[in-house]
Amino acid sequence: MIFRRAACLAVVAVVAATPLVVTAAPAVAVAPSCPSAGLTVAALHGPNFYVDTSSSPVLQGAYAGYRVTDTTGNPRSDLWVALSDFTGGSVALGAGQPSAQQVATLAGGASAARFFYLTAQAESATAQRHSVAVWRGRPDLPGSAQLCADSGGFSAVEGTIKAAANKLTSVAVSAGTPKIGGTFTVTVKGDTGTIGAGSANDPSSFWMSPAASGSWPAGAYRLVGTSLSFTGGATYTDTLRVSGLSSASKEYTAVYTFRAVGFTSSPTTVLPVQQIASGTQIKHTDLGSVASLPAIAPSTNDLTIALSAGAQKLPDTGGTVVFQAAVSGSAGAVLDSFTATVPAGVTLVPGSVTWRGGAIPDGVSSAGTIVLQGPFTVTGSGDVLSFAPGVARHLGDRVTSVRRDRRLRHRRHHPVADRQRSGDPDGQRQHVPGGGRRRTSRCPTTSPPP
């Protein structure tokens, strides 16, 4: 009997969502409307997009969002909210902003909000439209299905000017340097000034955003929650805009919760802007205090992965190997997914995937990888992903590449990598454009043990 190494396999844990290319669902020619699919999708932003291209700094961005609500009473899982098909020529996704975001679980009758950073190139009287779709499964993976699609967007891109009474009184970033996978907050306090009637389609409104720059790194910081409260008034959760406000000037506190999902090369200054009705117009926050606003320090990473295999060798008839990926790092960090790069002929054994000892859905095979979709919350103890690839009969060499994700550095411990580090001539190091390194290793057929 001939034995060979179990498999060369690489595991990458991904925190930052890779920008997705959202395509139409192949099963239907036209996606149903969301109400007909038992879902409602409501905009969290205003009817117009606002910019000020004459201010310093230039204001050309804002967070928009959608609240998805189940109306069937049945729980749902692994939903994705995706924006695509932007038209109008000015408004688009901000740099680094993924086009799709996951709603991992949604109880029957419950709601969930997801936020997207948008930018506008210039004022425009042309309607700026896009499609907002809800998918079951990550849109770029096999087996996903578009449940519904509705139209979203803005009536126009309108220019605004500052209102001196619309001012910031304090801005604070939660203490410490953000860690990849962890959260931090930006707390903004200010005064609205007298709230006016506003425009006909945006009356007596308050639209807040923690960022307004065209260069905001939306791929490094993911907005995951908001809270807004007015002194002596109501508190709003996971919203961006409130309309129909009384005219009296109000003090407010806005808290934005971000998750660090990528890296920046330098500190990022926050630029919170509130677009508030003033007279018959909408005017933005006075930027006189911009020079004193705090910055977010570049994120650091302490997450590591140790990969081990339950068997070193298999007979040439193939077999199953249990792999374990043990994660260590700061408790509370959340990983979006794991991606295992596998050789040809390797498939996942159904029902073999567990996280922290509990069964989770099987992964999705795609283009030589197995994607195990999370989220996965790190607790600091027992954070182990276990899965069992089945290795088909195969004679000869197997080649697998191990790529270090640019957004999440980690260790991998498995027999082939250990041989590479010890100077095995079978390991060859290659440069990968974009900042990572690829290691190519050969797993030769070996003779039976003595």
Image (spheres, helix red, strand yellow):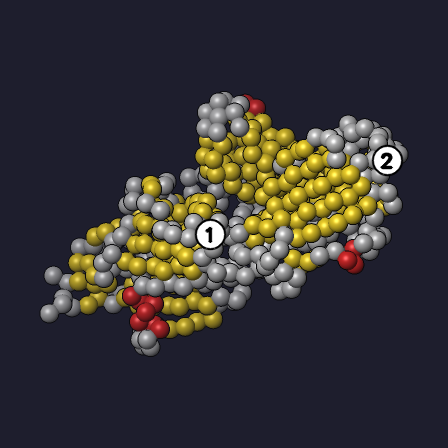
**Kind of residue at badge 2:** Thr
Does the rendering let one see residue 282? no
Q: Earlier in the sequence, mark 1 or mark 2?
A: 2
Please give the residue where the numbered disc 1 appears in the rendered image: 331
Q: Secondary structure at mark 2?
A: loop
Q: Circle 2 sits on which residue? A: 194
Q: Is residue 242 visible?
A: yes
Q: Position of residue 50 (x, y in %)?
A: 78, 42
Give the image location of residue 119, x and y in percent: 71, 48
| Quarter of the rendering occupied by the N terminus | bottom left
Residue extending farthest front = 232
Rendered location of residue 193, percent (x, y): 84, 38
The kind of residue tagged 1 is: Ala
Closer-to-camera residue (365/380):
380
Q: Is residue 119 above or below residue 132?
A: below
Quick check: 413 left or right of 374?
Answer: left
Tell me the residue at 29%/51% (across/down): 389
Total tally of numbered discs in the picture? 2
Alpha carbon separation for disc pair 1 and 2 = 44 Å
Query: Residue at 15% of width from left, 63% of height from top?
Result: 2
Q: Residue at x 40, y 55 (%)?
A: 327
Vertical comparison of 318 with 444: above or below: above
Q: Is residue 361 left or right of residue 321?
A: right
Q: Position of residue 375 (x, y in %)?
A: 46, 45
The residue shown at (45%, 34%) is 77
